[in-house]
Amino acid sequence: MEFIIENYFAFNNPEYLYVLAKLNKNFYKQISFILRDKIYSEIKQNPYVNLILPNKNLIYYLPDNISHFGLTGYLDRITLKNHEHYLKMIGEKSCPHIGIGRDLHKRLFISIFIPNKTVITLFQRFTSNEYQWAWGSLYMVPDELNGNNRLGDDHWIYMQKYIDFYFTNEIYEQRSKNPFSSSPNQDHMYLPHHHYLNL
């Protein structure tokens, strides 16, 4: 167990984890929770992540593979089915969750899963650059994120409200009005427009 945890990036291959889950589901879950706690701690200690994440029972370790990458290295190919698959592997229902992890380039990421609606992934843009973060998605996203895939202060503030709305009981002044009602229909897929020169 200690060997696996110390070298967990070597076991980041979803196919390996799937085999492990079939052989011993409880062992896989134990490893998954330990990895989640490790990544959760790294994210909380990262001064450039301007988010307060919800309770850990709504967060899980999401393995990453090459299929999650777009052509520019963006983590914008994580799908609703990816989340549903890995939640099922640890015995969790398909309800709002946040998947966290490190990708094949050792970049931290936070993938927000809203069933039947959308997946928005926030990620460290470059391996050697901890302070520059971006977002990616295959789905329609709130208007507040459109225009630039680099996460600025306004984007972080908005994503905090987004997380609070779906994952906590915090009440806002206009809680009765969905703050995302002005967004396009999130049930349709689209290819995000990356602003390469700004990243």
Image (spheres, rainbow, N blue to C red):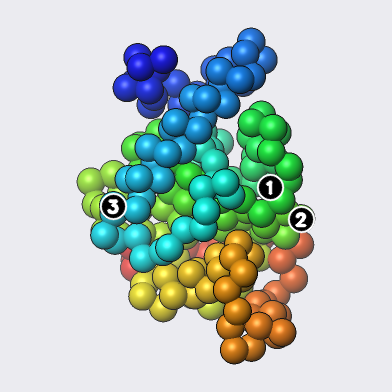
Label pair 3/2, CB-CB below 8 angstroms: no
- The amino acid type found where label 1 is placed reads Leu
Q: Is residue 26 above or below residue 140?
A: above
Q: Residue shown at 57%/46% (left/top)?
A: 57
Q: Residue shown at 47%/51% (left/top)?
A: 110
Q: Residue shown at 36%/65% (left/top)?
A: 50
Q: Which mark is residue 45?
A: 3
Instruction: Name the residue beneath numbered marker 2.
Output: 116
What whole-number distance in Å separates the C-alpha atoms at marks 1 and 2? 7 Å
Q: Going from the N terminus, do you reach mark 3 or mark 1 first? A: 3
Q: Is residue 100 above or below residue 185?
A: above
Label 2 secondary element: loop
Q: Give the residue furthest to the bottom.
A: 173
Quarter where residue 52 is shown: bottom left
Crowding at dot 3, Cα within 10 Å, few <14 / some 14-19 / many 20+, comes out as few
Label 1 secondary element: helix
Q: Which mark is residue 80?
A: 1
- The amino acid type found where label 2 is placed reads Asn
Quarter where residue 199 is shown: bottom left
User: Which sits in the foreground, 62 or 103?
Assistant: 62
Q: Locate residue 27, reporting x and y percent.
A: 56, 18
Crowding at dot 1, Cα within 10 Å, few <14 / some 14-19 / many 20+, comes out as some
Q: Going from the N terminus, do you reach mark 1 or mark 2 first? A: 1
Q: Residue shown at 52%/25% (left/top)?
A: 30
Q: Is residue 82 above or below residue 174?
A: above
- Frontmost of labels 3 and 1 is 3
Q: Going from the N terminus, do you reach mark 3 or mark 2 first? A: 3
